[in-house]
Amino acid sequence: MIGISKLYCKTVEPSDALRYGRHSGQLPSHLLQFSQDKKPVVVWNMTRRCNLKCVHCYAQARDEAFKNEMSTEEGKALIDDLAGFGVPVLLFSGGEPLMRKDLPDLAGYAVEKGMRAVISTNGALITPEKARILKEIGLSYVGVSLDGMEPIHDRFRGVKGAFKSAMTGIENCQAAGIKVGLRFTINKFNVSEIPAVFDLLEAREIPRICFYHLVYAGRGSDLVKDDLTHEETRTAVDLIMDRTRDLHDRGIGKEVLTVDNHADGPYVYLRLQKEDPDRAAEVLELLEMNEGNNSGRGIGCVSWDGEVHADQFWRHHSFGNVRNRPFSEIWTDLSEPLLAKLKDKKQHVKGRCAGCRWLDICGGNFRVRAEALYDDVWAPDPACYLTDAEIA
């Protein structure tokens, strides 16, 4: 996760993170990526059921009941363990998490245990009453997925009216006083929507947006051919930076992040070296704190059936099941070969990644993407768009 607004627009300084001792339990949400202890943010895909039919769904969700989902009581036992382990944030996802009637109960329980609870949703099920309940339980944030304006979004979501429902859900969150933001997954079919999404962000007074690079997992595996070329990715990241700076210069504060391609960090730094060398040095310090990709270390995932994964895209490899052992025990058991290597990926990456000068601040980028394309977890990430000259 690369904070474009934080880094490029100087909204965060190295001293901001240092002031809190860089401990995840003490850092405010917007500084968590700079924590030193790397207690994992945990994504709980609490259901595989979904009311939409998204073409790039990593969970391959469907609108049907699945018998192997964890119960409410099992969910609370998971939350007890995560809280005791020091997990700072629990992200409820799916499928569509609001398909589970016990979501408010479980999210509220997480808040009671001292964690920040957030949800990732398509927004369609957030009625005014549901928004009021989510506010009352202390939910920290609602991230609503949006793939572009109405024609593109409805096409990606597989249901006509999905865009209007998402916007209604956003409006209901805003009316209830819940912080809400957008989640946008970039690919060839919607990259041209980025300017319109920025316009929407401003017009609807939405404070935050995360631009996700495509990960080849689940139904997204079929979209490898639809990923951007390296040059197209550079153009898209430049556009995101330009539009973020424009908002900042006009006094319109928005939090803009890119996710799932840690080449974005060095790319921001290299651009700043040309534009503002002093700020570039500060950004390099922040990127070193960030440490790049944290799959299996600073982020983890629990599936609807209790299986534990390095992140939400690595569903084909389980480290264990929370129905048999607590997450905290599974996460720290280095007898699991892949988990042990993911804790220190830099020793195992191959090819151009192994000799890259940015390895310490990129962390080897996305291993699951390398595995998807090359059938080798430690091969170079095919989505890294930095040139050989830039990494030498």
Image: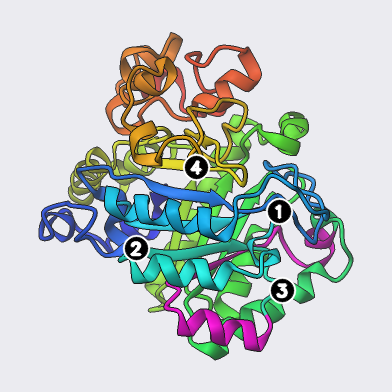
Viewer-nearest of labels 1 and 3?
3
Give, as a three-letter code, the residue at label 1.
Ser
Q: Which residue is mark 4?
A: 301
Q: Are marks 1 and 3 in contact (CB under 8 Å)?
A: no
Left/right of residue 144 with respect to residue 224 in the rendered view: left
Q: Which residue is mark 2?
A: 115
Residue 86 at x, y = what percent?
A: 27, 51
Magenta residues, start to end: 127-154
- Mark 1 → mark 2, Cα distance in angstroms: 37 Å
Q: Which residue is mark 3?
A: 125
Viewer-nearest of labels 1 and 4?
4
Give, as a three-letter code, the residue at label 4.
Cys
Residue 84 at x, y = what percent?
A: 28, 52
Q: Does the magenta run of residues contain 188?
A: no
Q: Which mark is residue 192?
A: 1
Give, as a three-letter code, the residue at label 3.
Leu
At 35% from the left edge and 18% from the top edge, which residue is drawn? Answer: 356
Q: Secondary structure at mark 1?
A: helix
Q: Does the magenta run of residues contain 139?
A: yes
